[in-house]
Amino acid sequence: MTTLSGLAQTALARAAAATPTNTYPGVYVTEQPAATKPIPGVETGQVLRNTTAAADLHVGDALNFVGHSPAADAIARFGDAAVKVGSSFQQSPITSAASRFGVGSIIGKVKLAPTFDGPPILGTFQQQRFADNFAKLNVFDQARFGLLLVQAGSDHERQYLQKALAAGHTVDEVSTFADEIRGKSDAWMQQNLRLTGNANGAAGLSQQWNDSCGPATAQVLRGEMDPIYSLSMRQGDTDIHAVDPRPNATYIDQIVGIITGHPVGDHKLAAEEKSILENGGGVAVERGQAGGAGMNFAQAFNSMTQWTGVTYIRHNVTTDTGRKDALAKLDADLAAGIPGALRISSDDTNSGGHAVAVTGSIDGPPKQYVLHDPWDGKTVYVKASDLQAGNIIPTIAGWTHLTDVYSST
């Protein structure tokens, strides 16, 4: 027989036995018996059967969290096995646990919570990746994760917790992350849990070495998919927008910086970029210095596959048809919440070039792509019609021409 911890049992008991006067903000329950208390995150509409109170509560769209995701299992995991929150979560063993404590099932559909302007917090690609990773957890870690969702202060917090698990982090790591973001505003999370921004010209990550545009773009791509990584980079560096690699920082300097809360410039960011670059056969020199060398961009991007879940492939685009087909693949990725990348240069034959990330698109009119340029460390909007013609307008880092598009396989 599977049992839950005292914490889980307490959460259920509180939801089932507290008086109706101690309601939670934003929770609306009709026909509520005096012996019960609404559950956080539940709104009017569907039915929660509480066998302890022997009454039906009419509640909302079954935990108005995230469509096709087991975020609703924060409560439903303590209901019976009949709970269905997406096809991947019909038979998890923990769904029956709460029936042993007198709580039945939640029946309803789960709707995608509204998000801020920009890419989705949790796109369909990461929803599935979350589902897969959640299913691999043992029953007790599933319960622990469910309680983290219950304790979260907003739908956006819950989505970022799911996103962290989708990126491959352990429940212990997600638990620490949950404590760091609990109660934070949507604006704070948008600012700190990514490495780029939404607005045209918004400041974000800058490459720390002369030829590390590929590794820096890889960092942006991972940052779009892994909020724990983004937060650690922002906390571990003085200013990710500044260029301050501190190549001579000692290990003791770094430890002191962590202890005191005063990072050693952008050494953490720079050290990772340098490692990726040198592992790819490149040479890291400070910006503006001679003697550096770049690396294969796809290799750089795929150094993050463990966390992004994405393997990128290169589409060399030298014709209108080639650009149209490759951008269609990019559009499909963006629609699923997968960022992409471009290689830009002066023309199709130049061996020199520059990598930029593509984090989203704007329907318009006119339709525009949202790029992140790691050289200037800024967001740049480029019209889709210009990219389709092979043009980079405005010029980015001195480059004017689109040569390659990188999409998922």
Image (cartoon, grey):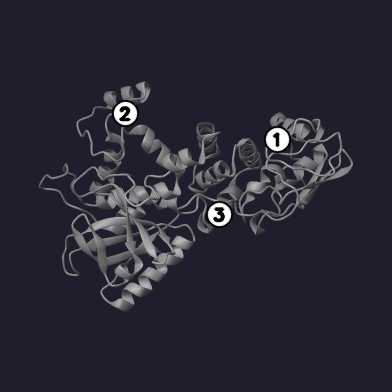
Kindly report which numbered mark, 2 or 1, lies closer to the viewer in this rendering. 1
Disc 1: CA contacts within 10 A as few (<14), some (14-19) or many (>=20) = some
Residue occupied by mark 1: 24
Q: Are marks 2 and 3 in contact (CB under 8 Å)?
A: no
Q: Earlier in the sequence, mark 2 or mark 3?
A: 3
Q: Residue 63's spot in the image, x, y percent?
A: 68, 47
Residue at horizontal 45 percent and vertical 46 percent from the top: 226
Q: Is residue 372 left or right of residue 282?
A: right
Look at label 1 and name its amino acid: Tyr
Q: Residue at x 23, y 39 (%)?
A: 243
Vertical relation: 267 (above or below) 382: above
Sequence order check, earlier mark of 2 and 1: 1
Q: Position of residue 64 (x, y in %)?
A: 66, 49
How far, Cα to Cα, is label 3 from label 1?
A: 27 Å
Q: Which residue is mark 2?
A: 263
Q: Residue at x 11, y 48 (%)?
A: 291
Quick one: quadrant of the N terminus? top right
Residue sitting at the far left:
290
Categorize mark 2 by other alpha carbons within 10 Å: few (<14), some (14-19), many (20+): many
Residue beneath disc 3: 127
The reply to whether residue 300 is visible in this rendering is yes
Q: Amino acid at mark 2?
A: Pro
